[in-house]
Amino acid sequence: MNEQIETVIIGAGHAGLIMSYYLSELGREHVVLEAGRVAERWRSERWDSFFFQFPNWTIELPGYKYECDDPDGFVPGTEVVRFVQNYADIIHAPVRCGAKVTSLERLSGATYLVNTETKAIEAANVVIATGQYQKPAVPPLNADVSRDVFQIHSSNYRNPDQLPPAAILVVGAGSSGCQIAEDLNQAGRQVWLSVGRHFRVPRRYRGRDYGYWRLVMGGWDRTVDTLPSPEAKNLPLPVVTGFKGGHDVDFSRMAAAGIVLLGHLQGISNAKLIIASDLKQNLDKGDTWFNDFTKAVDEYVAKTALDAPQESQSTARTLKIKKVAQPILDLDLKAAGITSIIWATGFRYDFDWIKLPLFDETGEPIHRRGMTACQGIYFLGLKWLYKLKSAFLSIAGPAEDAAYIAERINDGK
């Protein structure tokens, strides 16, 4: 006979654990199924020198706040794992590790069947909390790269010693790509960095961290229905780092340190990479976002009369980047001595195991604040599920959404 549980939560990351917290507060029966370990992606998909991207004071989950002697500092990824694991223990979350869900389907009426590799569970409610994205997104052109070039996705990068000797190409200039490029550069490796669209922001401005300004100015609480278009959900996230106490991700400084900047990668022809001529455009757009953000802070400070010291000078890009006016448009990997490519190209959804009509033609989950057209089926922890913060560990991002879903479950909706 199948096991019967009122609510199944799939995923024991911070979102799934927050959901467990609120269901426990309401006294509702539930279980949390996790394919690996608690906080698995924090454990197995971060590099050795990774530091959390927001200050320590932002790290909190419902009923549990990170305590330390340096609230404005940044903790390594291993400390994030410890924090999330401690949370699971403190709230007595009913987590079953090593329980990989292989399918979710309707059994009958409003009852669903959750199949794992070892058993099946019947449930009236299922909360899908597997993360905002689950599967590495590597462009198809990687198949055209010579087989003697080592390729790896950023989620599998650990340290420079993992890679063959010689130069490395990092494709993607979001937070992961930039941090990995700096990690390799500081280890003495020659690095080439392909820079696409990015949202550059100051690590600190007028005496406060970027995360502080986002919080007090209401950015984290911006709701999805205020966006100008559905496509706006896919705008790049801010490029930030907590490495070595946190600093601006500055491409001019990276270029001065020897990292060779390229435009975005377009294709491969005759064993050469074809590079777009958009490097200057991408850098200028990143600087525009940077300056627009600092201007918004200045206006907020003036409006609220907040005590925030003036910057002595602009922290936007100050160094001239060589060869931007005549960018590299093709690159022979062998001639450049490049033996490795790191694809810092993000992630995509992996919901093929869900056998329910929950997605649009692009594979995007269809929901409103986590509620779907299938009664009892919910999403949690997705990017822009309801607010900008909905997927973040910082400031208990999914907490409001989880509390909302818990009330719906409690009311039988």
Image (cartoon, rainbow, N blue to C red):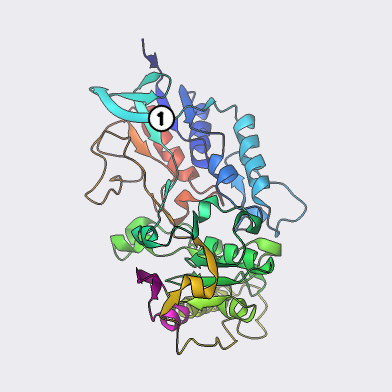
Any part of residue 200 in sight: no
Left or right, 374 with reference to 148: left
Q: Is residue 69 magenta?
A: no
Residue 404: quarter of image: top left
Given the current orientation, which residue lies at the most extreme top position?
1
Given the current orientation, which residue lies at the most extreme right position?
69
Q: Is residue 265 magenta?
A: yes
Asked whether 272 or 412 is in front, the reply is 272
- Name the residue beneath numbered marker 1: 101
Stretch of the chain drawn in magenta: 264-283
Residue 116 image position (x, y, % from top left): 40, 25
- Residue at 60% x, 30% y: name it: 91
Residue 187 image position (x, y, % from top left): 69, 65
- Residue at 34% x, 30% y: name it: 103
Q: Is residue 198 shown above or below 363?
A: below
Check the picture and name the quadrant holding the N terminus. top left
Counting other residues with Cα less than 10 Å from the Cα at mark 1, is it few (<14), some (14-19), or many (20 or more)? Answer: many
- Residue at 70% x, 63% y: name it: 245
Asked whether 230 or 41 is in front, the reply is 41
Q: Is residue 260 shown above or below 394?
A: below
Asked whether 37 or 150 is in front, the reply is 150
Check the picture and name the quadrant holding the C terminus. top left
Residue 408 image position (x, y, % from top left): 37, 33
Residue 32 image position (x, y, % from top left): 48, 29
Left or right, 323 with reference to 256: left
- Give the SS element for disc 1: strand
Any part of residue 281 in sight: yes
Left or right, 149 with reference to 311: left
Residue 10: quarter of image: top left
Q: Amino acid at mark 1?
A: Val
